[in-house]
Image (spheres, helix red, strand yellow):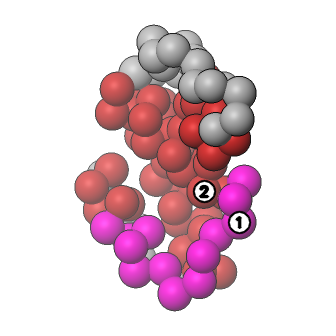
């Protein structure tokens, strides 16, 4: 199944039968946030909230990427992950 848009790609991730790696999940998160909200303008989370810091860093790694580019990259990543997680 090839998702045509962001919403279809998000729906497809919910059908995964196995969990992607933490690295893959962080990529999905960062691309999704960039696609839906643009550049991260939020404040960095506190030092001991490692999960929030990892998510923040992932989103920041896509700074400057257009929403359209982020959507395309997110869809490609979901297609790739669906080969092993569906």
Question: Mark 1 — residue?
Answer: 21
Pick the quarter of the image with the N terminus.
bottom left
Please determine whether, in this image, residue 17 is positioned above or below residue 30.
below
Please say whether residue 9 is visible from this viewpoint: yes
Magenta residues (range): 11-23
Where is residue 37? Give x, y as percent. Answer: 34, 26
Mark 1 element type? loop
Where is residue 45? Give x, y as percent. Answer: 58, 25
**Label 1 packing within 10 angstroms: few (<14), some (14-19), many (20+):** few
Residue 15 appears left or right of 44: left
15 in magenta: yes
Within the image, what quadrant is residue 34 found in? top left
Q: Nearer the viewer, residue 20 or 4?
A: 20
Please determine whether, in this image, residue 9 is positioned above or below residue 83.
above
Question: Mark 2 — residue?
Answer: 25
Residue, x 55% and y 74% (percent of image)? 82
């Amino acid at each position: 199944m090839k998702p045509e848009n962001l919403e279809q790609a998000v729906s497809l991730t919910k059908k995964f039968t196995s969990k992607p790696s933490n690295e893959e999940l962080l990529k999905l998160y960062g691309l999704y946030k960039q696609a839906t909200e643009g550049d991260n303008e939020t404040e960095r989370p506190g030092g001991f909230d490692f999960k929030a810091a990892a998510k923040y860093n992932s989103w920041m790694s896509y700074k400057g990427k257009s929403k359209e580019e982020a959507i395309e990259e997110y869809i490609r990543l979901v297609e790739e992950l669906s080969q092993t997680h569906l």
